[in-house]
Image (cartoon, rainbow, N blue to C red):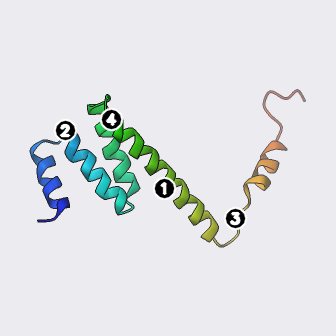
């Protein structure tokens, strides 16, 4: 029986089991399923706020997601304006508070 199956069975029996949720999040993180890992780690944190491990792993999830976003931006092709161009465009729009 796979680790994933064992954890799913444990969570079916006790959906608030912090250890099973943490272990499931670790599997999800390893498989680069960052959204699911984040959701499970947040649940563990809510159930057992005294535990530091979920917070530490959650920071790794955020770091990995940031790297993933950077890689996707680098691989993006097509007419996408740069952030600086967009900031320049928006900054030239008069504010509602600017006197006319």
84 to the left or right of 12: right
N-terminal of the pair, mark 1 or mark 2, is: 2
Residue drawn at x 25%, y 50% as measured from the top left: 23
Residue drawn at x 35%, y 60% as measured from the top left: 30
| Residue 72 coordinates in the image, percent (x, y) | 57, 65
Circle 1 crowding by C-alpha within 10 Å: few under 14, some 14–19, many from 20: some
Quadrant location of residue 95? top right
* Residue that carries the numbered disc 1 in the rendered image: 64
Q: Are marks 4 and 1 in contact (CB under 8 Å)?
A: no
Give 77 or 54, whichever is nearer the viewer. 54
* Residue that carries the numbered disc 3 in the rendered image: 80
Query: What is the distance, in whole Å, between disc 1 and disc 2 at their CAs?
Result: 26 Å
Circle 2 crowding by C-alpha within 10 Å: few under 14, some 14–19, many from 20: some
| Residue 27 coordinates in the image, percent (x, y) | 29, 57
Query: What is the distance, in whole Å, between disc 3 and disc 2 at their CAs?
Result: 44 Å
Query: What is the distance, in whole Å, between disc 3 and disc 4 at their CAs?
Result: 38 Å
């Amino acid at each position: 029986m796979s680790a994933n199956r064992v954890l799913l069975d444990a969570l079916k029996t006790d959906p608030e089991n912090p250890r099973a949720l943490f272990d499931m999040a670790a599997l999800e993180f390893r498989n680069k399923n960052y959204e699911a890992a984040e959701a499970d780690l947040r649940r563990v944190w809510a159930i057992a706020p005294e535990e530091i491990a979920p917070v530490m792993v959650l920071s790794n999830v955020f770091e990995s997601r940031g790297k993933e976003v950077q890689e996707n931006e680098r691989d993006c092709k097509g007419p996408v304006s740069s952030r600086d161009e967009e900031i320049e465009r928006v900054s030239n729009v008069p504010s509602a508070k600017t006197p006319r």
